[in-house]
Amino acid sequence: MGDLQGEEDSIYGNTRLNILQVIEERNRALNKKSLLHRLVYVAKLHDNLHDKRDLGSHYEKKFKQWQNHFQGEGATGMLLVYPNHFIHLVESSTEMLSSVIRDLRDQCQSSGASLISCSKILVISSNVPTRLFNQWSFRVLNLPASRLEEYETTEPIEKLAPECLALMLKLGAYLAKQPKVTLKNVMDSLHEKVPDLLIPQDLLGYLLNSPDLCSPSEFLDRYDKPFDCVLDQELVWPLPTKNFPIHR
C-alpha cells in the first residue's frame, strides 16, 4: 500500500506545475508569437538597368537569404515595376523589413552596378493583424514611358502618401478575391483590368522628390541612433528633492 501511495505521489509531483513554471510557460508562448509588420516604399530605377525583371530576381534571392538567416515570418507582398520607378509593399518581421531598408540604402549609395538610384519610405505599419497578400510577387507593368513634366498638385504630402497606400491596399484586397486559376492572368493585365487601382507613375516621381519623406539612410540614422531624452528636471539646479508627489 505504501509503495502504491509513493508511486501516486511521484506521478502527481511530476505533472503538477507551480506558479513560476506557469509564468515561464506563458512567457515562452508569447515569445514564440511573431509579430507582423508592413513596409511600403517607392524608388527610382537605375538608368543602367536594362531588364526590369532583374529587380524581381534580386528580391527573390534576397528574401530566401533573409528567411534562412532569421527563421521568422516569411515575406509576402507586391512589387509593381513602372517604366522609371517602382513601388514595393512587403509584409514580414521587423528583422526582414530592416534588411530590406538596409539593402535599399546600400543600393542607393553604391557607386558601382546598382538596380536603384534613390528611394523614399512611405510608411511602416507595426503589428499588422493579418496579411493582405498570400505570397510575394512582382509584375512589370506594360505602360508608356513616364511623362517628362513634373507632377503638379496642391495637395500636401500628408494626403498624397495615404492615398497611395490606400490604392496598394485596395489592390491587395482585389487580388485576394480572385480565383487562383485566373490570378496569374489578372496580375499580368492589371493596367487593363484595374487601372484605377494603380498609382500614377508621375506621382511616384513626385513622392521621391518630396523632402518630407525619409530616405533609407535617414530612416536608419534615426532607427539605429540611441534614444536620448533630457528631462526638464535635469536642467534645474538644485535638483528637486521629491521624485514622487505625495497626495494627502
Image: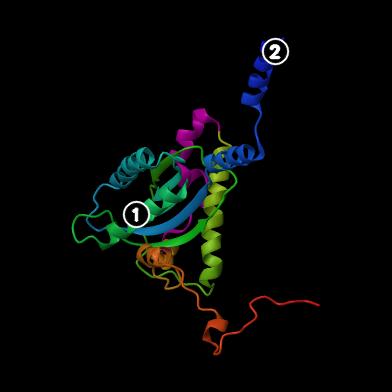
Amino acid type at mark 2: Gly
Which region shows up in magenta?
Answer: 179-202
- Residue ID for mark 2: 2
**Helix, strand or loop under label 1:** loop
Q: Is residue 247 visible?
A: yes
Which quarter of the figure is the C terminus placed in? bottom right
Q: Is residue 67 above or below residue 159?
A: above
- Residue ID for mark 1: 83
> Magenta stretch: residue 193 in it?
yes
Amino acid type at mark 1: Pro
Q: Report x, y in % for residue 110.
A: 23, 60
Nearer the viewer's eye, disc 1 or disc 2?
2
Q: Nearer the viewer, residue 22 or 56?
A: 22
**Helix, strand or loop under label 2:** helix
Q: Is residue 150 above or below residue 164?
A: below
Residue density around tag 2, few if under 14, some if 14–19, many if 20 or more, within 10 Å: few
For image coordinates 47% across by 61% down, the residue present is 122
The CA span between labels 1 and 2 is 84 Å
Q: Nearer the viewer, residue 158 or 244?
A: 244
